[in-house]
Every structure is written in structure tokens, then in C-alpha cells.
Image: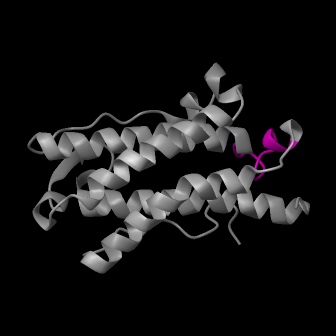
Amino acid sequence: MDLRFPIGKFQRPASITAEQRSGYIDTLAAAPDRFRDAVRGLSEEQLDTPYRDGGWTIRQVCHHVADSHMNSFIRFRLALTEDEPIVKPYDEAKWALIADAEMPVEPSLCLLSCLHHRMVVMLRSLSDAEFARTFRHPENGLMDLNTNLALYAWHSRHHEAHIAGLRERMGWK
């Protein structure tokens, strides 16, 4: 198994049905509790263990997910209120080195919980036409909100799998 992509790389879907969309939203709704469960009972030393050689620590993963999903939330909102906005990418590797990435994971878990609550309420309210709205990412090109939703459902499962996989490999119950 590729430890970097334990659930495989994201595959951009050609189309997304309303049923798939609902499943993706359900994944986002469940993600905060799943992350909290994934790190429950881990010591500080365990939180500071990389999920793979050369990878981020579990602590950095938790902070990264909050950072990334905040950016996604803003991208959804920009696409809903502007015509094909150009979104700003960010250097996630450098963000993972900022001092707040060393703090306890609880603030990021709380942030993720509140953020996903708002995001899910927003997403459940959108029409098919709104999910077809787009933004332009300088590195990833034109993305509609269906694709962004699929990406962030995958992103949630991807990073949860990093933590779960490490716990399993290390025998951490």
C-alpha cells in the first residue's frame, strides 16, 4: 500500500449524481467526529509521530485539515457569489511549519467541527445550478462545486486514513 495515498489518489469525477453529492456531504458531516475519534487517547509523543517516513506528524495532519477545509469553504462561497473567481493557492507544506502547527490539536478539531457544521448547512441548501458554479484554481484549472465537494470528501477520508493506518501499524489502540 502507498502510505502517501492510503485510499488512492483523488479521481476527478466526470459527473456527480444527487445521490453521490448527498454521500459526499454526509462524509463532510461525519469528518469532525471521525478525526476526533482517530486521535482519541494518543499521547503527545504519538501525535508528534509522522504517519510515514518524510510525512507530516499526526498533529500537523490535524492542523492541515483545518487549514485546507477553511480554504475550501471560502472557495465555495466565492464561487457562489462571484462569476468564476480566481482562487489563491497556498503552500501547505510551509503552512505546516508555522508555529501554530505545534500546538495541541484540540483547537483545530473544534474549528473543523464548527466549520463543517456551517459548510454542511450551506451545501445541503444548494441547487443543482449552484453546484455547477465554478472557480478557477491557478494550478488545478476550472473546478465546479460538485468537483470541489468530491475532492474535500476524499480529502477528509484520505487524512483520516493516514492517522488510522499509523495507529494500526504501531499497534496503538
Residue 79, x across and y down, in percent: 18, 45
Residue 65, x across and y down, in percent: 54, 44
The question of residue 50 being in magenta is answered with yes
Residue 6, x across and y down, in percent: 64, 67
Q: Nearer the viewer, residue 170 or 88?
A: 170
Q: Quadrant of the C terminus?
A: bottom right
Chief secondary structure of the magenta portion: loop
Position above or below: 117 against 8:
above
Could you say which quadrant of the image residue 132 lies in?
Answer: bottom left
Residue extending farthest to the right is: 171
Q: How is the image coloured?
A: one colour
Position above or below: 17 against 132:
below
Q: Residue at x 57, y 38 (%)?
A: 110
Position above or below: 21 against 139:
below
Residue 84 falls left or right of residue 103: left
Residue 152, x across and y down, in percent: 42, 56
| Residue 50 appears anywhere in the view | yes
Q: Nearer the viewer, residue 54 or 129?
A: 129
Could you say which quadrant of the image residue 25 lies in?
Answer: bottom left
Q: Residue at x 66, y 36 (%)?
A: 106
| Residue 4 appears anywhere in the view | no
Q: Which residues are magenta?
A: 46-56
Q: Nearer the viewer, residue 79 or 6?
A: 79
The question of residue 32 being in magenta is answered with no
Residue extending farthest to the top is: 99
Residue 9 falls left or right of residue 79: right
